[in-house]
Amino acid sequence: MPQQITVIKVRRGGKGNINQELQWMGGSLGLFNLRDKDSSCFRIFITLVRNSRNAHAVSSDEIASRLNLTRGTVVHHLHRLMNSGIVVKEKEGYILREANIENLIGDIKRDMDTIFSELQKVAKEIDEGLG
């Protein structure tokens, strides 16, 4: 499945405040946008972060119930998070790709390095083909 992550340089604020740091991180990865007026995606992300600490997958129904959101809203945001490669689906539900955020960011960086290496290789081949 193709992954899509948008990296945005966002001014970091609220150092020391975990919620603001998570908001900054998600914003830097293009996960949260202004259309999400009630911060649904952010709240879902936080739920998954908390559950990842103990490797507990959580269902869309469980997330919807906990956060007082419709299942449709939860599924929409879960699909965005899965398309970004941050969340994976398991039999029991959804879980972050890694058990902690540092490893998650490391995985994303490796993914991006791989993509850019391939782009550079193809660019070289194109340049050589153009003479």
Image (cartoon, rainbow, N blue to C red):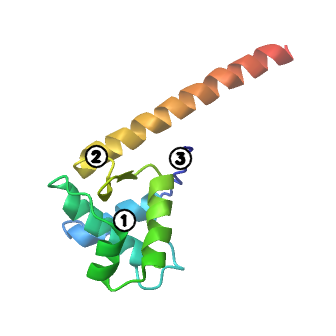
Assign a secondary structure to mark 3: loop
Residue 10 can be seen in this image: no
- Earlier-in-chain disc, 2 versus 3: 3
Residue nearest the viewer, comparing 103 with 9: 103
Q: Point out the image quarter for the N terminus.
A: top right
| Residue with the mark numbered 3 | 3
Residue 67 can be seen in this image: yes
Q: What's the distance in space between the residues labelled 3 and 1, CA to CA?
A: 21 Å
Crowd around label 3: few <14 · some 14–19 · many ≥20 (10 Å): few
Q: Residue at x 33, y 48 (%)?
A: 97
Instruction: Say if 112 sits above or below 102 in the image.
Output: above
Q: Position of residue 16 (x, y in %)?
A: 18, 66
Q: Is residue 13 left or right of residue 70?
A: left
Residue nearest the viewer, comparing 32 with 9: 32
Residue farthest to the left, as pictured: 54
Crowd around label 1: few <14 · some 14–19 · many ≥20 (10 Å): many
**Picture quadrant where residue 130 is located:** top right
Residue nearest the viewer, comparing 22 with 54: 54
- Earlier-in-chain disc, 1 versus 2: 1
Q: What's the distance in space between the residues labelled 1 and 2, CA to CA?
A: 19 Å
- Residue 98 is tagged as 2
- Residue 80 is tagged as none
Q: What's the distance in space between the residues labelled 2 and 3, CA to CA?
A: 16 Å
Residue farthest to the front, as pictured: 91
Assign a secondary structure to mark 2: loop
